[in-house]
Amino acid sequence: MMTGDMGTHHMDAEEIESYSLGSLSEGEAAPFHEHLLICGQCRKKVEASDAYVAAMRGAARLIRQTAAQAKAGSRSGARTRSAGSS
Ligand SMILES: [Zn+2]
C-alpha cells in the first residue's frame, strides 16, 4: 500500500485523534490538513474529535482545579497547630 498518496487516503480514527490532539509534527499534519480541505467526511470526524478533545481538556482542567482545591483545603486543615507541641 502506498502511503505517499495521502490526497485520497481517508484518515483513520488514530490519525484523526493524533491530528486533533496536535501530537503530529507540522510535516506529519500537512497531508492531513490538505486532505481535510477536500474531504468533508474526514473534516466532520476531526471536528467531532476536536470537540471531544476540548471537552476532555476542559474536564481535566476542572479535575485538576478541584483536586488542587481539595488539597489546599486538607492542607489548611492539617496545618492546624496544636499549641504547645514543641
Ligand atoms: Zn477523507
Image (cartoon, helix red, strand yellow):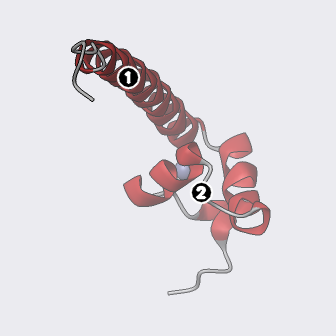
Q: Give the alpha-carbon distance from disc 2 to disc 1, as whole Å.
A: 19 Å
Foreground residue, 63 or 9? 63
Foreground residue, 38 or 77? 77
Quick check: 72 above or below 30? above
At a point 62% along the width and 49% down the height, the residue shown is 22
Quick check: 58 above or below 36? above
**Which label lies toward us, 2 or 1?**
1
Total marks drawn?
Answer: 2
At a point 72% along the width and 50% down the height, the residue shown is 33
Point out residue 42 in the picture as x, y percentages from the top left corner.
53, 43
Name the residue type under label 2. Ser
Residue 49, which numbered label? none
Residue that badge 2 annotates: 23
Name the residue type under label 1. Ala
Q: Quadrant of residue 63?
A: top left
Point out residue 69 in the picture as x, y percentages from the top left corner.
37, 15
Residue that badge 1 annotates: 59
Quarter containing the C terminus:
top left
Q: Say which label, 2 or 1, has the lower sequence index.
A: 2
